[in-house]
Amino acid sequence: MTITSYRDLKVWQMSVDLAEAVYSLTQDFPKTEVYGLTAQMRRAAVSVPANIAEGHGRETTGAFIQFLRVAQGSLKELETHAIIAQRLDFMSAPAKDKLLGTCDELGKMVRGLIRSLQERQSES
């Protein structure tokens, strides 16, 4: 399969699904958290596909790799927010565990893409 757009990347597609899931998960958070944990989780979740897309649109492989690393950081941020949200009883433990599993799977995919790009870069 030829990748002609960031939209063709499975990692981008899954990260958009993750962002959508986070919006659904956080809609029942307390209204007092609308500018707190709700906003933080949503921002981190949306940052993942946005950075993948922006990196793909850059002119160099090195820039793409850097944006993928930012996406990795956003996944870790989201994981931390989910743990805090569950501790505060804003979400159930099973919902948190499912979210962490998705973040872990996406993190592995991002790391794999970074390694692939680095290998291709070193061959050039």
Image: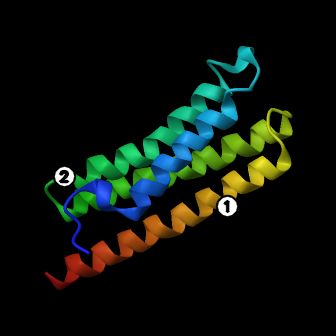
**Residue matched to label 2:** 58
Residue 58 placement, left or right of 66: left
Task: Please give the name of the residue rendered at 67% of the width and 52% of the height, measured from the top-left corner.
Answer: 99
Q: Quadrant of the N terminus?
A: bottom left
Residue 63 pos. (x, y %)? 24, 56
Q: Which mark is residue 101?
A: 1
Q: Amino acid at mark 2?
A: Arg
Residue 100 pos. (x, y %)? 68, 55
Name the mark nearer the viewer: 2 or 1. Answer: 1
Question: Closer to the N terminus: mark 2 or mark 1?
Answer: 2
Q: Amino acid at mark 1?
A: Gly
Question: In which quarter of the view is residue 78 placed?
Answer: top right
* Extreme residue toward the top, this view: 32
Q: Are marks 2 and 1 in contact (CB under 8 Å)?
A: no
Q: Residues within 10 Å of mark 2 (few under 14, many from 20)?
A: few
In this view, 8 is above or below 119: above
Residue 74 pos. (x, y %)? 51, 47
Residue 96 placement, left or right of 93: left
Residue 35 placement, left or right of 49: right
Task: Please give the name of the residue rendered at 67% of the width and 27% of the height, measured from the top-left corner.
Answer: 27
User: Label 2, label 1: how many angstroms apart (C-alpha)?
Assistant: 29 Å
Disc 2 element: loop
Task: Please give the name of the residue rendered at 55% of the width and 48% of the height, measured from the top-left corner.
Answer: 18
Q: Nearer the viewer, residue 93 or 1?
A: 1
Disc 1 element: helix
In this view, 47 is above or below 30: below
Task: Please give the name of the residue rendered at 84% of the width and 48% of the height, measured from the top-left corner.
Answer: 93
Residue 47 pos. (x, y %)? 44, 41
In this view, 112 is above or below 21: below
* Extreme residue toward the bottom, this view: 123
Q: Residues within 10 Å of mark 1 (few under 14, many from 20)?
A: few
Q: Quadrant of the C terminus?
A: bottom left
